[in-house]
Image (cartoon, rainbow, N blue to C red):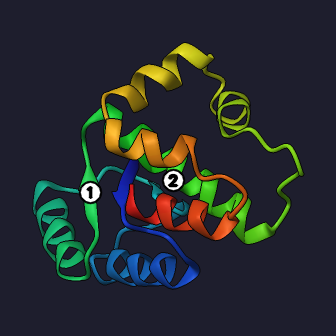
Amino acid sequence: MRLFIKNMVCNRCVMAVSQELEKLNLKITRINLGEVELQKEPTVKQLLQLTDSLNLLGFEILDDHKQKQIEKIKALLIKKVQFGDIEEHFSVIQFLSAALHKDYSYIFRLFSELRSHCDALCKFGESHHIMEKIAKAV
């Protein structure tokens, strides 16, 4: 089972989420920023406990498809900034289109619904620190 978790922005977040899963004896297959894959589906009780414990730490389990996509985008942008491999003429839209295997119109529609974030994201300019702040705020 795959869970999407909001506000996982660094390795410390990954460690904190991992610890909460371990406390509930939930076995992790894979964990990345914003995403956890479990070996098996948690019980309703485990899921409620996990939701509560993650909320106390500032995280949120997502169930809305658009929110999941936004978290995936956020994780991609954070990794891009953290690895420092941003080319001189970097295009956010081209990067996201390739990484998500979605066309420009899909990404445009997604961000059009989140206008305030889109305006900031599309106009981050030369400063990669601004891009990282935007990714954390989305």
- Residue 53, percent from left and from top: 19, 78
Q: Identify the residue at image location x=89%, y=51%.
A: 88
Q: Which of disc 2 and disc 1 is earlier in sequence? A: 1
CB contact under 8 Å: marks 1 and 2:
no
Q: Distance between the residues labelled 1 and 2?
A: 15 Å
Asked if residue 117 shows in the view, the reply is: yes
Q: Which of 115 and 70 is in front in this view?
A: 115
Task: Give the foreground label among 1 and 2.
Answer: 2
With 133 as the anchor, is 101 left or right in this view? Answer: right
Q: How crowded is mark 1: few (under 14 residues within 10 Å), some or many (20 or more)?
A: some
Which circle marks residue 20 in the picture? Answer: none
Query: Residue beneath label 2, please?
Result: 74
With 138 as the anchor, is 10 left or right in this view? Answer: right
With 105 as the anchor, is 54 left or right in this view? Answer: left
With 23 as the anchor, is 74 left or right in this view? Answer: right
Q: Identify whether 126 is placed above or below 67.
A: below
- Residue 32, percent from left and from top: 57, 62
> What amino acid type is highlighted by mark number 1?
Ile
Query: Which quadrant does the C terminus fall into?
Result: bottom left
Query: Residue beneath label 1, please?
Result: 61
Q: Identify the residue at image location x=73%, y=58%.
A: 126
Asked if residue 1 shows in the view, the reply is: no
- Residue 58, percent from left and from top: 25, 76
> What amino acid type is highlighted by mark number 2?
Lys
- Residue 111, percent from left and from top: 41, 32
Q: Identify whether 57 is placed above or below 87.
A: below
